[in-house]
Amino acid sequence: MTRRPFHFTIACNEGRWTVYPCGDLDLARRGAIANLAEVLVECQLPDITLDLSQVTFIDTAGYECIHRAVAVIEASGAVTRVVNPSPAVTRLERALQPVAS
């Protein structure tokens, strides 16, 4: 199976910015995600959506990187939403949920 290189697509629709991470989101992408968060903060965008529908694989390191990026962006005063988790993201979120006793 051929993997597409990891990349971001960024779109603006009526003043609302959406970032689409595409491909595998893991420890190897930590720097790219941190850099993206810094750039978004520098741009002073008031409203940012992270659409995870195109994430093909995510591990706990990638999940942590996304949460750190959201925290950095929100600390700048921007409103941030994470939407449309792909099946890979949904599987990891379910696995990370505490088990009820």
Image (spheres, rainbow, N blue to C red):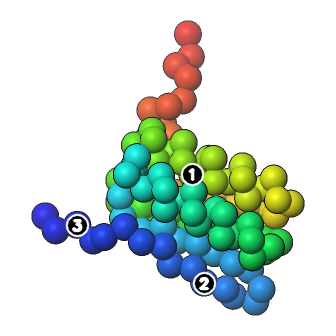
Q: Of the two numbered discs 2 and 1 on the same chain, state the one appearing first in sequence.
A: 2
Quadrant of residue 40 within the rendered picture: bottom right
Residue 40 shown left or right of residue 35 in the figure: right
Mark positioned earlier in the residue sequence (3 or 1): 3
**Please, is residue 81 above or below residue 58 in the view?**
below
Q: Is there CB contact under 8 Å for labels 2 and 1?
A: no
**In the rendered image, is residue 28 in sight?**
yes
Mark 3 residue crowding within 10 angstroms, few (<14) / some (14–19) / many (20+):
few
Amino acid type, label 2: Ala
Where does the N terminus fall, quadrant-wise?
bottom left
Q: Position of residue 66 (x, y in %)?
A: 57, 51
As drawn, 90 above or below 54:
above
Q: Residue furthest right?
A: 77
> Which quarter of the rendered picture does the C terminus lie within?
top right
CA neighbours of label 2 inside 10 A, class few (<14), some (14 to 19), many (20+):
few
Q: Position of residue 92 (x, y in %)?
A: 44, 41
Answer with left or right where residue 3 lies relative to residue 90.
Answer: left
Residue depicted at 42% across the width and 56% down the height: 29
Q: What residue is disc 1 on?
A: 66
Q: Secondary structure at mark 2?
A: strand
Residue labelled with disc 3: 3
| Residue sitting nearer the eye, 91 or 29 | 29
In the drawing, what numbered circle is on residue 11? 2
Location of residue 37 (image quadrant)? bottom right
Placement of 7 over or under 71, stated as above or below = below
Q: Residue furthest left?
A: 1
Q: Amino acid at mark 1?
A: Ile
Q: Is residue 84 visible?
A: no
Q: CA distance from mark 2 to mark 1?
A: 18 Å
Dot 3: what SS? loop
